[in-house]
Image (spheres, grey):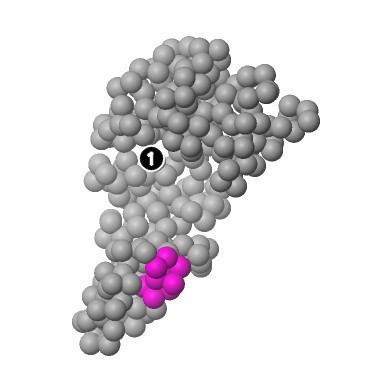
Amino acid sequence: LANQAKLAIAEGYITSGDPEKAVFLLRDIPADSAVLELRSTALIKLNRREEAQVVLNELLQRYPESPSAYVAGTQLLLEGKRFDDALAILNSGLERLPGNWLLLLRRGVTNKMRGAYPEARADLTASLENGGDPSLVAAALGDVMAAQGEPRQAAEVFRVVIERTHQPEFQLAYALALAQDGHSSAALAQAAKAVAVLPLSARAHFEYGKMLRRNGDAHAARKQFERARDLDPQFGANLYALSRLYRETRRPGTRREYRA
């Protein structure tokens, strides 16, 4: 097989949950950046983290002009909450590639994870200003704004991104930001849209159910909680909300639903 075909097959193995075959296939392909990234991903999925870190170090050393190399190279560090080490790598990348939106996004997410919200906001805003993909940047930026006690600004970010990208995953975030800002009617309307565009999202149905419950519509809330339960029987927060609603409305089966 040609190397490109092998790469595609290896990626398919990783996606389908068989990273061992991917590692075996990749070992005979010359190690360019794509091969190293796939190999590290497969090793991480196999929990062979020390081997993966060796591959990631090689990736950074050999391809210092590649933004994705810095993103991949910080993956294990972020999983291990080694934020200072991750920031050192990202800072070195930005010294070499100043203004790169992907590295600014990664550094912003890293700062967000360590609770440094002003620094995260500055990086994420700079990422957008330098051509960052709004669909990738907006979620993190909105979360940071909400964490800083600015849900109105977060809602505006999500509204603009929905208008520009029409991506459904931002609909729920928009509804939650509106609710946090005290706009309950607008939040309900947007949450209804969220369950319409994300019909298989247990989280969307759960959050919509909570809003309906707060609005006094127990019957509609129960339907949303039950739908969320059907989609994800292990969603603990939803099971608790549903069992509590059953109990408050004296519906039989509270104990069974709570333990489901």
Residue highlighted by disc 1: 141
Amino acid bearing label 1: Leu
Please, which residue is most extreme toward the left here? 248
**Secondary element at tag 1:** helix
Magenta stretch contains residue 90: no
User: If the image is split into quadrants, where does the N terminus sit?
Assistant: top right
Residue 70 visible in rendering: no
Most foreground residue, 229 or 7? 7
For residue 7, above or below residue 245: above
Q: Quadrant of residue 245?
A: bottom left
Q: Quadrant of residue 8?
A: top right
Horizontal relation, residue 233 to residue 33: left or right: left
Q: Which residues are magenta?
A: 224-233
Q: State the residue at coordinates (36%, 34%).
A: 79
Q: Give percent across and percent down for residue 177.
A: 34, 54
Q: State the residue at coordinates (47%, 19%).
A: 54
Residue 119 visible in rendering: yes
Q: State the residue at coordinates (37%, 44%).
A: 142
Most foreground residue, 130 or 95? 95
Q: State the residue at coordinates (29%, 79%).
A: 256
For residue 187, above or below residue 163: below
For residue 184, above or below residue 176: below
Tell me which secondary structure the magenta stretch mostly adopts: helix
**Dot 1, how many residues are within 10 Å of its Cα: few (below 14), some (14-19), or many (20+)?**
many
Q: Give percent across and percent down for residue 84.
A: 30, 22
